[in-house]
Image (tube, grey):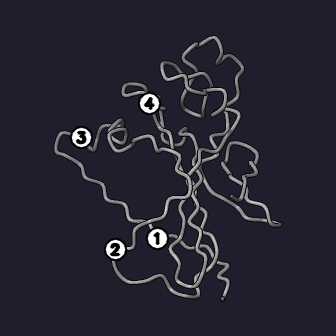
Amino acid sequence: ALSVSFEFSITILIILLSQSINSNNEQSWKGMAETATEQELIKPKLIFGSIPQNIKGTVYKNGVGRIKLNDDLYFEHWFDGDGMATSLKFFGNGKLPLFTSKFIKTERYLKQGNETNKFIASGAWTQCTDYHKNILAQPNNPSNTNLFYFNDKLFSLCEGGYPIQLDLN
């Protein structure tokens, strides 16, 4: 089987905005963001057509996976949202791929943990709820911008921090 070693992305984004959302409101983006969930080895359902026989390899992508802690507590900007990496692994011979999504276990993500009533760590725009912890605090790396494959290793990137090595599985 031919191994395909290029990155491609098919993204379909459908945004349904009701008339109640004011597009001039700086907070209107919050109505479009829900926290993603981690998923392990999901086999998609083929609706029509077939998977090409010679597609073999893995597509990796990342972006924001958690933009809010509860229904009333959002990060101040989507750039502060916690990163999530996804993979779509093709096995060749027309077999269905497997999908996986996992939060990137940054220092900030781990520090926040399951706390949903206040911000534990600061971001570029989002400050700790306990304001005294913001004094001299540097923004933390949400690792939500891009993935980079180098030397048989996969790294998650953000402009505000060092790369984080991810498990290829």
Identify the residue at the far left of this view: 19
Q: Nearer the viewer, residue 25 or 100?
A: 100
Q: Nearer the viewer, residue 20 or 148?
A: 148
Q: CA distance from mark 1 to mark 3?
A: 29 Å
Q: Based on the displayed image, in which of its 4 quarters is residue 122 positioned?
A: top right
Q: Based on the displayed image, in which of its 4 quarters is residue 55 positioned?
A: bottom right
Residue ID for mark 3 = 22
At horizontal 48% and vertical 32% (from top left) the residue drawn is: 75
Q: CA distance from mark 2 to mark 1?
A: 16 Å
Looking at the image, is mark 1 or mark 3 nearer the viewer? Answer: 1
How many residues crowd mark 3 within 10 Å: few (<14), some (14–19), many (20+)? few
Residue ID for mark 2 = 47
Q: CA distance from mark 1 to mark 4?
A: 28 Å
On residue 90, the disc is none
Q: Is residue 16 left or right of residue 47?
A: left
Residue ID for mark 1 = 10
11 shown above or below 27: below
The amino acid on which the numbered mark 1 sits, given as a three-letter code, is Ile
Looking at the image, is mark 2 or mark 3 nearer the viewer? Answer: 2
Q: CA distance from mark 2 to mark 4?
A: 36 Å
